[in-house]
Image: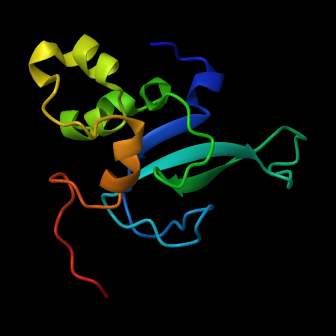
C-alpha cells in the first residue's frame, strides 16, 4: 500500500466516539458506525508558518456523495470482513475472498452499503443513549 499523503486524504473507519456530525445530513455519527473522513484545507492558518492546515470532515458512509471504489480508501483493510463486503462488487468479493461467497447475497456491493451502513455491526459495542 502506498503511503503518499494524497492516498490518505479520504479514509474509511469506525467512529471512535459520537462527537462528529455528518457533513452531508448533519446527523450525529454514532460510536462504531462506519464513517468516511475527508481531509479538507482549512481557511485559517495555524502555526504562523503560512502552511496549509487540514481539517477532518466526516460523513456517514452512505451519505458520502463522492462515492468511488471504497476499497481504495485508506483504512478499508481495517474493516471487518463482513463490513468490507458491503462496499464491494460481486467481482471484488470473488477476487478477494474466493468463489465460496459468490451468490450468497444478491444485495452485495455499493448499493447494499447504503442500507447496511445505517445498521450497527457486530463490531459496534452496545451503548445506551444519553
Q: Which residue is painted at 34% across and 45% down in the image?
A: 112
89 shown above or below 117: above
- Where is residue 16, by image quadrant? bottom left
Instruction: Please provide percent x and percent y for residue 73.
Output: 49, 30
Q: Which residue is drawn at 44% across and 13% down?
A: 1
Residue at 34%, 57% in the rendered image: 33
Which residue ends up furthest to the bottom in the rendered image? 130
From the viewer's perspective, is residue 21 above or below residue 5? below
Nearer to us in this view, 6 or 92: 92
Q: Which of 66 and 112 is in front in this view?
A: 112
Where does residue 3 sit, x and y in percent of width and height? 53, 17
**Left or right of 72 in this view: 100:** left
- Compared to 6, does 10 lie above or below? below
Q: Which residue does the image show at 82% across and 39% down from the upper left?
A: 52
Locate residue 109 relative to residue 19 in the image: left or right. left
Residue 76 position within the rendered picture, expressed as x and y whole percent measured from the top left: 38, 31
The C terminus is located in which quarter? bottom left
Q: In which quarter of the image is residue 128?
A: bottom left
- Above or below residue 59? Residue 4 is above
Answer with left or right where residue 76 lies relative to residue 123.
right
Q: Position of residue 75 (x, y in %)?
A: 41, 32
Amino acid at each position: 500500500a502506498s503511503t503518499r499523503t494524497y492516498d490518505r486524504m479520504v479514509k474509511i473507519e469506525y467512529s471512535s466516539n459520537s462527537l462528529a456530525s455528518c457533513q452531508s445530513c448533519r446527523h450525529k455519527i454514532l460510536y462504531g458506525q462506519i464513517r468516511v473522513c475527508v481531509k479538507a484545507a482549512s481557511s485559517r492558518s495555524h502555526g504562523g508558518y503560512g502552511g496549509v492546515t487540514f481539517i477532518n470532515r466526516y460523513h456517514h458512509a452512505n451519505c458520502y456523495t463522492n462515492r468511488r471504489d471504497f476499497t481504495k480508501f485508506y483504512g478499508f483493510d481495517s474493516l471487518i470482513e463482513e463490513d468490507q463486503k458491503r462496499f464491494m462488487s460481486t467481482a471484488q468479493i470473488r477476487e478477494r475472498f474466493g468463489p465460496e461467497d459468490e451468490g450468497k447475497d444478491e444485495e452485495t456491493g455499493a448499493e447494499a452499503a447504503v442500507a447496511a451502513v445505517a445498521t450497527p455491526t457486530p463490531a459496534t459495542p452496545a451503548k445506551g443513549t444519553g
